[in-house]
Amino acid sequence: MGEACGGIPLSSPSDRVLAAKIAAHERWSRIDDRSAETAQARAAFEARFPNENARKAYFLRLAKASADARRKRSVVAELRAMADELETA
């Protein structure tokens, strides 16, 4: 696929994650005032919500989606374990 971040090959997802982490750390190492650097993005995010209730609803939806995803992963893992058990029996 190519190389980035000091020659790390980007052939697998874990390699790409590592390259992205290195790039992020290198970028932030050059920034003196993180708060000032992210102020515009934070303001744009907050502008999405007309009031505090809309903001709370947004984060509650995120929490529900996260819980659903964890529950789904748990069920899938349980089903795979049961299938493995049946194959070895």
Image (cartoon, helix red, strand yellow):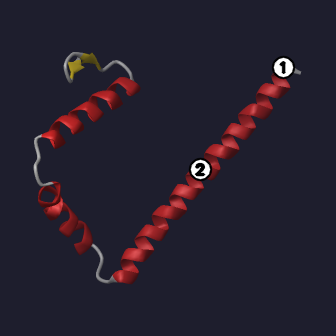
Q: Which residue corresponds to the image point at 23% horizontal and 38% vertical from the top-left? A: 24
The x, y position of residue 78, in whole percent, is: 73, 39
- In the depicted view, which residue is nearer to us: 28 or 59? 28
User: Is residue 1 in view?
Assistant: no
The quadrant of the picture occupied by the C terminus is top right
In the rendering, which numbered label is found on residue 70? 2
Quadrant including the N terminus: top left
Looking at the image, residue 5 sits to the left or right of residue 79; the answer is: left
| Residue 23: mark in rendering | none
Callout 2: 10 Å neighbours few (<14), some, many (20+)?
Answer: few
Q: Residue 66: x percent and y percent?
A: 52, 56
> Could you tell whether 62 is left or right of 89 in the image?
left
Front-most of 77 and 5? 5
Against 37, is 47 above or below?
below
Q: Provide the residue designation for mark 1.
A: 88
Q: Amino acid at mark 2?
A: Arg
Q: Is residue 18 above or below residue 75?
A: above
- For this orientation, the residue located farthest to the right is 89
Residue at 78 percent across and 30 percent down: it is: 83
- 55 on left or right of 37: right
Residue at image point 12% right, 60% down: 36
* 63 over 14 or under it: above or below: below
Callout 1: few (<14), some (14-19), or many (20+) C-alpha neighbours within 10 Å?
A: few
What secondary structure is marked by label 1?
A: helix
- In depth, the one of 85 and 20 nearer the eye is 20
Farthest residue toward the front? 32
The mark nearer the N terminus, 2 or 1, is 2
Q: Position of residue 43 (x, y in %)?
A: 19, 69
